[in-house]
Image (cartoon, rainbow, N blue to C red):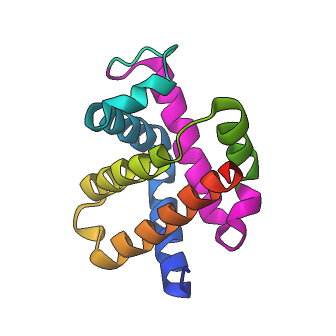
């Protein structure tokens, strides 16, 4: 459960990162593909080369969805309902991939925020991204 302080920290980081959504999303996806190559199987139609337009566009979609979720922390299920349906029923993505991408996204935040990515921010984002992954996996049950 996200505390009021967690929500405040998440929203502050999202506001600060709002002009870097494409960059952060792209980096997180590229990290995921390198670290967890099995995740590439869900993107057979993508050019998976570093900096490709397809990865940049999808990275922006991912980061924008997270930013939208951060604006709706009190109702993540509703905010992510469409994405949950898409991933469960159409794309059939293994839910473990949401957790893997979350880990990569945290690395990107840590790299870019540096000393501002405090243990408190890390913990808040860990809770937030775990909640997002859980909501995205809801429809699989």
Q: Is residue 72 above or below residue 22?
A: below
Which residues, given as a range, are shown in magenta?
Answer: 50-79
Residue 47: image quadrant is: top left
Please give the count of numbered marks on the rendered protein. Answer: 0
Q: Quadrant of residue 34?
A: top left
Q: Quadrant of the C terminus?
A: bottom right
Residue at the farthest bottom position: 4
On whether residue 52 falls in the magenta region, the answer is yes
Image coordinates of residue 82 in percent, x first then y, are 75, 45
Q: Residue at x 75, y 52 (%)?
A: 81
Residue closest to the far front:
141
Residue 104 screen position, x and y as percent: 34, 48
- Residue placed at 22% from the left, 68% from the top? 115
Residue 133 falls left or right of residue 32: right
Magenta stretch prevailing secondary structure: helix
Magenta stretch: residue 89 in it? no
Dividing the image into 4 quarters, which one contains the N terminus?
bottom right
Q: Quadrant of residue 124?
A: bottom left
Q: Answer left or right for 29 relative to 91.
A: left
Q: Is residue 73 left or right of residue 89?
A: left
Placement of 72 over or under 34, stated as above or below? below
Relative to 70, residue 108 above or below: above
Where residue 101 appears, as percent x and y from the top left, is 42, 46
Q: Residue at x 62, y 52 (%)?
A: 136
Query: Between residues 62 and 115, which one lies in front from this camera angle?
Result: 62
In the visual, does 104 lie left or right of 53?
left
Residue at image location 45% in from the left, 60% down from the top: 16
């Amino acid at each position: 459960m996200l505390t009021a302080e967690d929500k405040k920290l998440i929203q502050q980081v999202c506001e600060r990162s709002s002009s870097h959504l494409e960059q952060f999303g792209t980096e997180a996806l590229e990290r995921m593909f390198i670290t967890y190559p099995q995740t590439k199987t869900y993107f057979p139609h993508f050019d998976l080369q570093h900096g490709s337009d397809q990865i940049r566009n999808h990275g922006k979609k991912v980061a924008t969805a997270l930013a939208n979720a951060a604006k709706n922390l009190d109702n993540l299920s509703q905010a992510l309902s469409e994405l949950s349906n898409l991933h469960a029923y159409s794309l059939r993505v293994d839910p473990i991939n949401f957790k893997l991408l979350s880990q990569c996204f945290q690395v990107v935040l840590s790299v870019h925020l540096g000393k501002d990515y405090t243990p408190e921010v890390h913990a808040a984002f860990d809770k937030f991204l775990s909640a997002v992954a859980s909501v995205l996996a809801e429809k699989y049950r």
